[in-house]
Amino acid sequence: MRLATVHDGTRDGALVVVDATGTRAASATAIARSLQAALDDWDNAEPRLRGLAADLDAGRAPAMPLEPATLLAPLPRAYEWIDGSAYLSHVRLVRRARGADPPPTLETDPLVYQGGSGHLLAPTEDVALVDPKWGLDFEGEVAVVLGDTPQGTRASDALAHIRLVVLVNDWTLRELVPAELAKGFGFFCSKPASALSPFAVTPDELGAAWRDARVHLPLSVALNGTRVGSADAGAMHFSFADLIAHIAKTRSFVAGTILGGGTVSNDDPARGVSCLAERRAREIIEHGRPLSPYLVPGDEVALEMRDENGRNVFGTLRQRVVTP
Amino acid sequence: MRLATVHDGTRDGALVVVDATGTRAASATAIARSLQAALDDWDNAEPRLRGLAADLDAGRAPAMPLEPATLLAPLPRAYEWIDGSAYLSHVRLVRRARGADPPPTLETDPLVYQGGSGHLLAPTEDVALVDPKWGLDFEGEVAVVLGDTPQGTRASDALAHIRLVVLVNDWTLRELVPAELAKGFGFFCSKPASALSPFAVTPDELGAAWRDARVHLPLSVALNGTRVGSADAGAMHFSFADLIAHIAKTRSFVAGTILGGGTVSNDDPARGVSCLAERRAREIIEHGRPLSPYLVPGDEVALEMRDENGRNVFGTLRQRVVTP
């Protein structure tokens, strides 16, 4: 089942179910007025939403054309956005470029940070860059949306709390990062609003590619229409189940919490990059200095993930950088 | 106007208006079913809620007894919880105890971190401590609840975005902090769920004590019934307006975002402490080692703030530490 949120003038938008082709949708507001409302009452809403999806594909439900420009983020505002850094090749590469060792606990203790969740960008929403010197970069990610998740949840029980999977562009202002991290409290101003893919999908939509609490498909990343990355998203060192167990050590999470796996990254340079920071890191290692500039107004970044049948599972998250 | 949220089995609870004595309330669900709903539509809801409050105090509205045990946090789940560290005496003291210099930008660049907001504890809710070796500590704070706040908001325009003021106990697991901060991504597991005071109040309830975007009243902190702190909350180096301008540099915030000022702290040791970490820092400086233990099951922490007329503005935030 694939779900999306249509702009209707409300803060949370209107929930729709997406058909198998990704081009038509059926209003689901009679079941749940928003995706958050569905997640709040998932056991009741899920079977009814699946029934509507079946009716839509069978031509038994009223369908409307699905226009990407009318979509909001599946959750336009969410209660938490937590981002891991589970692809160790990313951490190692970025640290190597600046001559630093990875943290000694890299392989045993997940890196996570708490991000802002009150305002999540729509999948075709422009990204207004106030100052190009801030060093705007994209970060292509896979994330899961949780149901209620108690404190103390173990990795072996964590899968049951994963409701949906989405793609995320976790926009980052690279030139603001060093001074901010030096203060010791993590990212804040260096992480502007993230964007979500058009569709949030139940894990079964991924078929056999969803296993070991990872999505074993390549994440396609394009900059100005040119493919720059197709890294295997399954290369997470920590799975989503591991990340859930880590974050649930000292608190619980409410339905609608979004948990990211971090910038998708592979050891093999031929798979390209899911962020410019990695490309610049490789350039520093090879040439002694970065050659690729950060983004400027006019640049366009697109993320999508196709399954083995070529289906664009999450729709295309395509945004343009603009001057405010 | 003082607002509270009564447990009614829903995730967001039921909004009530609190009377002048703090002992009775009137249901406000006919105006807005929850505090978040009121904040989402504040321009419409605020005058009607104020009208209800006036009717309640005049005996013209149906009143119910206000039982602290039935209250949830005013916002049981919020879209963002952002915490500053605006009391520089706290930063200086804690750093001095560990022989470190404060960051060079201490007085010009606010320290803030993004905390978890999906689950905020009720004002009389027990705090379950899984492992006393985690070093549980309280942090008494004042926070503001924002309305919609655009990116780029300046300090001079920030006051207009402050809707409500609350007290916060920003519980911290001190012994998890060093290893977590060493990883460079800020706090996560070391910050379990925070608790909010019974009442969220409009700034005018503070009278002349609300000025310069600060609350100029002492925050009373009691541990097991003994007063341990009464620091002047007005001693913020950065005001709430300054903090808003800082966080809004690179993104916007939705209505219901909670912004804390950090652990209330004064230079004068006679004002006591709003967290055990400060007391332990003074002990380290004086005796070479900390003497005060962190909290254990059975301990009780109470926060409240009385105005110059002795009125308990926010109600009492009183929680007991328990074994899960």
Image: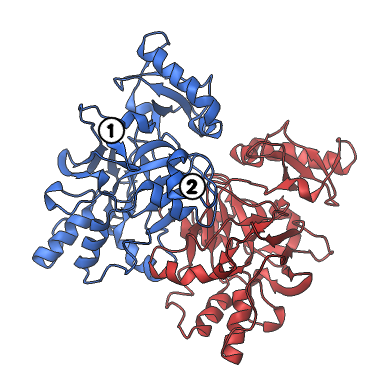
Chain colours: A blue, B red
| Residue B156, picture quadrant | bottom right
Query: Mark 1 or mark 2, which is nearer the start of the sequence?
Result: 2
Q: Which mark is residue A208?
A: 1
| Residue A85, picture quadrant | bottom left
* Tags 2 and 1 on a common chain: yes
Identify the amino acid type marked 2.
Glu
Residue at the limit of the structure toward the right, as seen here: B59
Asked if one can make out residue B269 in the rendered structure from this viewpoint, the answer is yes
Q: Chain of mark 2?
A: A
Identify the amino acid type marked 1.
Ala
Give the CA separation, mark 2 to mark 1: 28 Å
Residue B292 screen position, x and y as percent: 65, 80
Image depth: mark 2 or mark 1 in front: 1
Pointer 2 with pointer 1, Cβ within 8 A:
no
Residue B86 screen position, x and y as percent: 55, 69
Vertical comparison of A185 with A292: above or below: below
Q: Which mark is residue B179?
A: none
Asked if one can make out residue B167 in the rendered structure from this viewpoint, the answer is no
- At 58% from the left edge and 49% from the top edge, which residue is drawn? B119
- At 73% from the left edge and 65% from the top edge, which residue is drawn? B300
Label 1 element class: helix
Residue A50 screen position, x and y as percent: 44, 21
Relative to A104, B181 lies left or right? right
**Few, some or many residues within 10 Å of mark 2 (<14, 14–19, 20+):** many
Vertical comparison of A72 with B212: above or below: above
Relative to A158, B97 lies left or right? right
**Residue identifier under label 2:** A80
